[in-house]
Amino acid sequence: MNTRPLQYALSPLTQFGLADPIVEAYSEVSGRYDHLDGVDPEIANFELAEEDVKGEILMPLIHTQGKTVYLYVALAHAFRCRGYRPIITICNSLLPICLQKEGHPDTAGTCSNCHHESKTYLESFGFEPTYLSDYLPDSYDVPTTNETEVEPYVHNGVDLSTFSVATTRRFLRKYTIDFEDENDRDIYNRFLQSGIMLTDAIKNVLSERDIAATVGSHIPYVYGGALEKLSYEENIPAINYGTGYFRKNTVFFGHIRNRRSLNSDPTVLKTKVEEPLTDAEMSRIDSFMEGRRNRTVIRDRHNYIENADKQLPIDEDRPIIGLFCNLLWDGSLIGSDLTFDSPFEWVKQTIDFVNDQNLHLVIKAHPAEAHRETNERMVDWIRNELEELPSNVTLLEADTSVDPYKLADDIDLGIVYNSTLGLEMTCFGKPVIVVGETHYRNLGFTYDPETDEEYFNLLSNLEEVQLDREMKQRAKRYANYLIFGRHIEFKFANLEGPNRLPDLRHEELNAGNEKLDYVVDRILSDDGAIAYEEDSAPITETQY
């Protein structure tokens, strides 16, 4: 439902206190929350007796995050069934800016609508929202910042600059934050101010409540990772929670101390990549990876071009290198610069290097640049930076009809910044160089140069950059753990369909559900590697 006209209309009414009743009346007439009538009454009416409370779980929702609110209430109910009271914090039109305004008007009306939506959803499931303003003094003033470049900005023991950069990039849909541009500079400073306010409020929550663990979302951003980091610095378990990346109907847990959602505990990973798979596990991961390649299983949130079967006119007498770009404003790029200072520098130096080499470089832009609004594209940057590409460099647009999986079959070597395609290529038997920080780096199946000198030395000696059998086996062991261990399947994670309620049933969330019992225990135990490895029998395509 398009609520933009409503959000614009509400803005002048907020100062008179009329926004909330108007939103409520609009919601009643439009029926936009009628689907919430299907909430299980045992969930909506559940009460945790005060004498049964073992502790509290902080769940900073902050703003309505689409259907992920269902994931929040499902886990929140699982906690209260086991004696832990959820403290779900939301913003009541308090913050200078948030990502709710990413695709909506930057107005007070958007705040009013978001506040009403968050409150409605939570109350429908029997949760009373906790407002950030309740944990800030009445005299609290919105902080003022006037940063003219990205520098460390530590507040409450948390460097908010990295989280503000990631959130600003997502909001602006571009990698480069131009501080000479008034809008870019303003957006960055407003997210920095939001981070200050959020950590001020959450610090008070942590000190005044009996918080046993914090469960947040979206590690890169100010409303997620900054609050998890604050909790972690206060010696409170800080877990990241969201939908699965590679399998439908799954949830995924990360830990702030591992810096990224996909990262796991290094000690656990070392064991997993060295532990042989059973025949059934090997068959399952092979089937899954092949399905990723031929589209019989879901790939990711950004579908590739249908019927992408165009062949490239490439000189196959030369070694072929495939360079696969990231979506430039994706949060995973924060803190990932290792071998090079930026993805742009990586691409430029690689093009410069291959200019006089006997090889062919194919650069593939990330397909999401064609499917999602993007204000800075790698292909555009290359064309603006270089007047003419070398004859042995092929540049593929985001919407090219060349499938990157088919391209991977034709290359001799893959290069990625931190894309998970690098993991997939190793499972397909291709050697891969990784130049950025990623969840599968330094696990013994990719080449991981620390410096540009090491990187170009690898490119100069391609005959030595090979993928042996043990490296491929390690890649599959890790992929099996990532996809079938850390992706945990639950009925309530089925979020497909407009406004359709997932299957949230009290009896399935109650104590006694083995998987949820395990998840709750691991969160409370501050586990940095929450995984639930189920039966390794083959899984049907519809379950992916």
Image: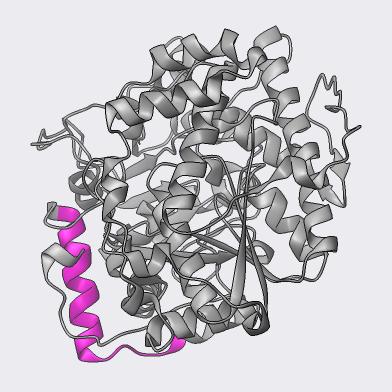
Quarter that holds the N terminus: top left
Q: Position of residue 53 (x, y in %)?
A: 65, 79
- Asked whether, in this view, residue 279 is left or right of residue 42, the answer is left
Name the residue located 48 percent from the left edge and 51 percent from the top edge. 123
Name the residue located 43 percent from the left edge and 57 percent from the top edge. 125
- Asked whether, in this view, residue 421 is left or right of residue 518, the answer is left
Relative height, residue 422 to residue 517 (above, below): above
Main SS class of the magenta portion in the image: helix
Question: Is residue 400 inside the magenta stretch?
Answer: no
Relative height, residue 164 to residue 134 (above, below): above
Residues 467 and 397: in front is: 397
Q: Position of residue 259 (x, y in %)?
A: 64, 58
Name the residue located 45 percent from the left edge and 25 percent from the top edge. 23
Q: Position of residue 298 (x, y in %)?
A: 21, 54
Question: Is residue 290 inside the magenta stretch?
Answer: yes
Q: Is residue 421 visible?
A: yes
The residue furthest right is: 139
Res 207 quadrant in image: bottom right
In magenta, the rendered stretch is: 274-293
Res 92 quadrant in image: top right
Residues 465 and 219: in front is: 219
Q: Is residue 344 visible?
A: no
Residues 412 and 198: in front is: 198
Quarter that holds the C terminus: bottom left
